[in-house]
Amino acid sequence: MSSEAIKLAKRFYLDEWADAMLYKKLAEWERNEKIRKEFERLAELEAWHAEFWKSFLEKRNEEPPKPKISRLTLWGVKLLRKILGPGSVASLLEMGENSAIEKYFRFLTEYSTELSDEERETLRKITLDEIEHEKFFREEEKAFHVENIRDLVLGMNDGLVELLGAVTGLSAVYPNNPQIVGVSGLVVGVAGALSMAIGTFISVRSQRQVKESIRSRMEVLFKVSPEKTVEELKEKLTEGGLPEEIAEEIAEKLKTNPETVKRLLLPETEENEVRASLYTGLSYLLGVVFPVTPYFLASNSLTALAFSVLLAGSALAIVATLISLLSGISIRKKVAEMVATGLGAAFLSYLFGRLMEAVFHVSAL
């Protein structure tokens, strides 16, 4: 077997073993009986998957790597579990499951001829298990409103990056007056939080209202002309990749069930505009705290700027690390991406601030 396939098999073994230990720990921490049992079941499945890859390697006279799970990973999982609940962990774990599904499918496709019939069948079963895991995570997201985790992360990231850029630019203008920079940063931060919250509220509400309007139109259309609604369903199924004859057969069978047709044509959204706006606005304010606080404690703006960059960069790195640990994304790449974009924006803002100071001499005011 090719060295690349062996390398992938070793990676799969380590990932499945780590997932099994992670689910086991989640089960130990979980108080909800239903969710605890589900995590225990997932731990057993992942352990079986790991055993398959271990056997896969041993049959080819390859030494399976020694599996381990870092304390940092367990700490990150436990922290998110305590702060945001099991739903947030489920949401991030789903990203890792999506990645596993794609990797297994590619492995099964590219190395099919190098696998035995039994191995191919087992790998198909494992892929189906991963897809089934994804279904569980989607159900948990609905139960714990995990759709708002996105609002939380984006809001905090925006607060960190935008306010770091603002205070950095102002530091170049007011190098000897950190209080002005701090107060200005707070004003910008509060205004930004309100703007983000209102924007999220309007966006989510408008989206829901548009869908409700379309749904009402469809109800009228179904009563007036069921054939036209069925035709729309047929077009959607065809666009989704189904052969035309199969799409037509499905549409004909569903024409007596208007509710099913409406759900297929326009899936309902569970996101609440009030909750989404609160998550976004409050997390934005939380992001504001890190870059602004040093300006109320330091004697000059440049000293405060150094601590502001340190705090904001650390916060960005922590957020990126927690996301990476649970989603299977490279920690190094994710941290580098978030920190580089945040500090890059701050550096450009500082240059712009110096330009404004040189042109308008506003630091003397």
Image (cartoon, grey):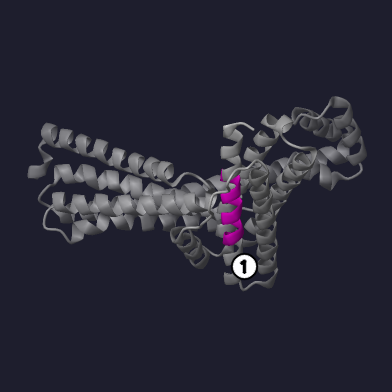
- Residue located 69% across and 60% down the image: 44
Question: Considering the numbered disc 1 on the image, is that residue within a helix, a strand or a loop?
Answer: helix
The residue carrying mark 1 is 27
Graded by Cα atoms within 10 Å as few (under 14), some (14 to 19) or many (20 or more), the crowding at tag 1 reads: many
Q: Is residue 340 magenta?
A: no
Towards the viewer: 283 or 4: 4
Q: Would you say residue 115 is visible in this rendering?
A: yes
Q: Residue furthest left?
A: 364
Horizontal side, residue 49 vs residue 357: left or right: right
Horizontal side, residue 196 vs residue 34: left or right: left
Q: Residue furthest top?
A: 244
Horizontal side, residue 117 vs residue 88: left or right: right
User: Is 86 drawn above or below residue 129 in the view shown?
Assistant: below
Toward which corner of the image does residue 123 lie, by quadrant?
top right
- Residue located 39% across and 54% down the image: 318
The magenta-colored residue range is 11-22
x, y percent for residue 332:
40, 44
